[in-house]
Image: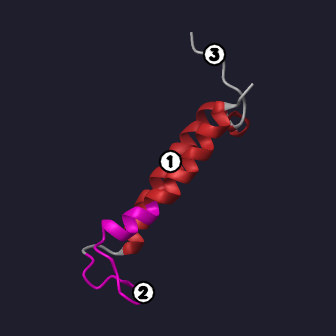
Amino acid sequence: MFNTNAVHNVLNVVIAVLAAATAFLLATGCTTLPTGALECSQSWISPVYTTAAITALGVLKSLINVVRDGVGGLLKKQPPVQ
């Protein structure tokens, strides 16, 4: 049987990482120069704060799962939906 709970939790981590990268680039006003360098002088917020906030949300989501089901609950199979 396919363990959808484990996949769900792996996706939570991937979402948090991708959201942090996207938020860093878009929400803070950073741009890529023709040379490929990242330029953030027009950023309205420090990339440190944006990255920390998005990462904290992803971590909080995972912590809620751990508190609810325990660490072992991150990989255990869930009962079928009624």
Q: Is residue 59 above or below residue 27?
A: above
Label 3: which secondary element? loop
Q: In this figure, which residue is indicated by the disc labeled 2?
A: 37
Amino acid type, callout 3: Pro
In the displayed image of the protein, which residue is found farthest to the front?
Answer: 34
Viewer-proximal residue among 59 and 30: 30
Here the colouring is secondary structure
7 drawn magenta: no
Q: Are marks 1 and 2 in contact (CB under 8 Å)?
A: no
Residue 60: which disc? 1
What's the magenta region? 20-43
Residue depicted at x 64% and y 39%:
7
Amino acid type, callout 2: Ala
Query: In the figure, is residue 4 to the left or right of 58?
Result: right
Label 1 crowd (10 A; few <14 / some 14-19 / many >=20) = few
Q: In this figure, which residue is indicated by the disc labeled 3?
A: 80
Residue 79 location (% of width, % of height): 66, 18
- Quadrant location of residue 47? bottom left
